[in-house]
Image (cartoon, grey):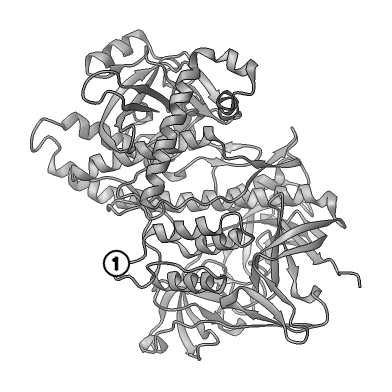
Amino acid sequence: MKKSKKSFKSNIKQNSTKKKPISGIIRTSGRGFGFFIPDDKEVGDVFVPPKGMNTAMNNDEVLLRITRSVGKTKKSEGEIVKIVKRSNTKIVGVFKAEANYGILVSDDSKLSDEIFVSKAESLGAKDGQKVVAEITVWPERFKNAQARIIEILGYPGDVGIDVMSVIRSFGIETEFPNEVLAQAEKIPETISEETIASEISRGRRDLRKDTLVTIDGEDAKDLDDAVSVELIKEGPNAGNFLLGVHIADVSHYVSENSAIDKEALSRGTSVYFVDRVVPMLPERLSNGICSLNPNVNRLAFSVTMTIHKDTGAVIAHEIFESIIATRERMTYTNVKKILDGEDTEVRERYKPLIPLFERMRDLRNILLERRTKRGAIEFEFAEAKVIVDDKGKAIDIVKREMTIATSIIEEFMIAANESVAEHFCTAELPFLYRVHEDPNAEKVKMFAQFASNLGYKMEGVDSPKGIHPRAYQKLLFQAKGKKEEKIISTIMLRSLQKARYSSNHDKHFGLAAEFYSHFTSPIRRYPDLQIHRLMKEYLAAEGKGAGAISATRLSRLERLLPDVALQTSLRERVAEDAERAVEEKKKVEYMARFVGEEFDAVISSVTGFGFFVELENTCEGLVHVNSLGDDYFVFEENKYRLIGERTRKIFAIGDLVRVTLARADAAMGKLDFELVVEKT
């Protein structure tokens, strides 16, 4: 059997880490061994052989002792000396019935050991059913874990079981507690005239005569942002734009520490799967009183920005509570058709609004140019949408098109989020920011070297001030339209940090923005809801002098917001991983009908055991090194390629190849390809 040589970089500190245990997370392989990811980022990953695992399971928090520090070509080795916290309290898998007991086989291939279930704790599960189980006895040396079944999902292949298995495995709650639903039922479905009068009398602005529209996807139901654009006709700002971004005032209905609020914080975000949405808020709010449906009164938070017609700079802004009534529920598709000017029927239908959309297009162009000049990084990865039938079966995969309409909303939301963040950072009040830190210096150098190997020079790598996002932007511009564009974009993205929420102000590297927040989606993101609540509190205190917000309250917020930032960042990652897992399963389900067929593909990633390829429809799968012919392939990690020792055949990221779909494992969400052998 062919093997692959792999060179590893070691960052292990040659110090007391050999003696003193270090803390971190263990990532298991499913084949007995694992890799230790230390909390101290200056310490490199550590290989843990099977004998050093000490019953640790995937994602457990552990203490590890280095047993062997090696040279630069291999990872150091270690052994787990203590399990600090178990991660896998609930397991989703298939129940295998035996005579007097059962065995749970986890869906997670990284949890390879069998888990025993006594007949008394099987909940009557039948052989082959998908179940959710709770660990009751953790594994010990020479002894498997034990569990009890707490939910029977159904048989694999039953409608919706594949998606529900993912939902359960990621710990995503689909049902709201009775207390939350009861509280939601008390919220009115419409806004009474008495409420309108009361809100206006206390200062909420009435914008119901203004021309506002929502622009969303065809299937969106939780409409939380509306926009308006006017040209200022008089005064010193005549000729400039007045952009209005109007966001559903969810905080009016969801008060701090209420049952709904606590549940929303626990969820952190709505989760969007191919066949369903798991909302952060009960549907009575998300699709009802908070959704900015057309021609109905809605409470909102508005940000109006005076934007210079030439530079795109925000000259002035106002933030205030409002009451609005949107004119139309527009879709990206129809706005694109209107601006393209080719669909006369759609243009006729929305004729009175055409000047509005044309102003939006003009303003979008100005804002985008401004962001580009300051160095914002724009990736252009192909995104796809899996189309499912009424039974949840994947029937097609279509590319998501980035159009002028989607770009209009993106630019407007970015402008509003920046203005809100700057406003409250300048006020020096506790706040929640969306931050994207500078990339790690070592990763910058590694990426620059990779780009150099492809003939691209990256500027400012050794600058004492750190790399500027404009350096990344220029590199993307240089590679645009060339065969290496995708590979450069992919490796570049991997070199960057991940954006997160923070109670401490920091810049947003990717957007090249000094200030940034998430204010525009309070129906589906908790940080936005929290920011609305802070804004309401701070705006009410403006002009009332020192002490308008008590020291006790400020102190509480300073303690609260770091926890909110951490919780919502974690839930965001869970949601993204769960959405990706379902999408991958559905893509495999769709591709299963094409087993045996050939496809053109691009190598999207290279590992020691083979390389991954991506098809035109964005489906991705593995070409294993064992299928590459009679040769010994060496993995050159720094060049992202495999090279045959005998044939010198090279398979590098970005290369175009012809492959055959060999296997489609929908249960595991994996596609296996084989290279098409060229005929001689």
10 Å crowding of disc 1: few (<14), some (14-19), many (20+): few
Figure quadrant of residue 509: bottom left
Front position in the image: 572 or 590: 590
- Seen in the image, is 137 located left or right of residue 199? right
Q: Image quadrant of residue 522?
A: top left
| In the depicted structure, whether residue 220 falls above or below residue 326 | below
Amino acid at dot 1: Lys
Circle 1 residue: 465
- Residue 413: x percent and y percent? 41, 36
Residue 223 location in percent, x, y?
49, 28
Outermost left residue: 546
Look at 30% across and 35% down and name the residue there: 533
Q: Locate the N terminus and report the quarter of the image it occupies.
A: bottom right
> Between residues 121 and 73, which one lies in front from this camera angle?
73
Quadrant of residue 484 within the rendered picture? bottom right
- In percent of width and height, residue 21 lies at 41, 82
Q: Quadrant of the C terminus?
A: bottom right
